[in-house]
Image: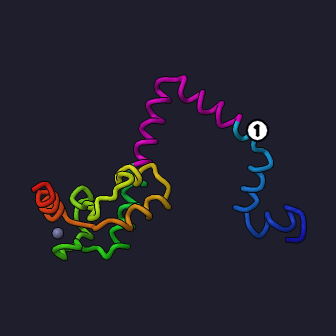
């Protein structure tokens, strides 16, 4: 790409400019992040607020990812065809039919990378609560 940052990248693509700037000033950015983290964690009230924020962000990410998965997998229970689009998320389960579980879907939803999540979900069936319970009951028997 031709031109300097101000002429080329900055005008066309502010996100790209930001990325390049952060890479260039990596140490300064890290130092600043460390300082502000310490400032928050050394104060009990700030810490409590931050923990609350983190929890909300986690919940938000989990709900959003699960919504995407439900739509991506067709929005129906793959056993009894029950509609799951408006179902409670806690009643929608991911079942490993071949017993090849590498990681918990619930954990990947909050803290895993999207790549690992998709890899794990490809092995799963999306089931409603009732069907999942029946499956496990059968396999235990
Ligand atoms: Zn079902």
Q: Residues within 10 Å of mark 1 (few under 14, many from 20)?
A: few
Q: Residue at x 50, y 55 (%)?
A: 113
Q: How far across and how far down the image is residue 5, in percent?
A: 85, 61
**In front: 73, or 138?**
138
Residue extent of the magenta highlight: 31-58
Q: Is residue 44 magenta?
A: yes
Q: Residue at x 46, y 52 (%)?
A: 112
**In the image, farthest residue toward the right:** 3
Q: How far across and how far down the image is residue 74, in percent?
A: 31, 76
Assign the magenta stretch its main secondary structure.
helix
Quick check: 91 above or below 49? below
Q: Residue at x 70, y 61 (%)?
A: 15
Q: Is residue 20 magenta?
A: no
Q: How far across and how far down the image is residue 56, in percent?
A: 40, 46
**In the picture provided, is 118 more to the left or to the right than 10?**
left
| Callout 1: SS | helix
**In the picture provided, is 77 more to the left or to the right than 73?**
left
**In front: 7, or 69?**
69
**In front: 21, or 120?**
120
Q: Which residue is mark 1?
A: 28
**In front: 80, or 41?**
80
User: In which image quadrant can residue 100 be found?
Assistant: bottom left
User: In which image quadrant can residue 1 be found?
Assistant: bottom right
In the rendered view, how is the structure colored? rainbow
Q: How far across and how far down the image is residue 68, in percent?
A: 39, 67
Ligand 1 quadrant in view: bottom left
């Amino acid at each position: 790409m031709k031109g300097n940052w101000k002429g080329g990248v900055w005008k066309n693509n502010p996100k790209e400019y930001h990325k390049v700037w952060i890479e260039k000033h990596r140490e300064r950015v890290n130092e600043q992040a460390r300082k502000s983290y310490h400032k928050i964690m050394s104060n009990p009230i700030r810490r409590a607020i931050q923990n609350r924020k983190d929890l909300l962000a986690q919940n938000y990410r989990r709900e959003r990812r699960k919504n995407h998965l439900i739509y991506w997998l067709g929005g129906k229970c793959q056993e009894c065809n029950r509609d799951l689009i408006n179902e409670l998320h806690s009643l929608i389960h991911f079942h490993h039919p071949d017993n090849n579980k590498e990681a918990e879907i619930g954990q990947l939803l909050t803290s895993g990378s999207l790549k690992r999540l998709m890899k794990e979900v490809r092995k799963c069936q999306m089931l409603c609560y009732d069907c999942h319970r029946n499956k496990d009951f059968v396999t235990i028997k």
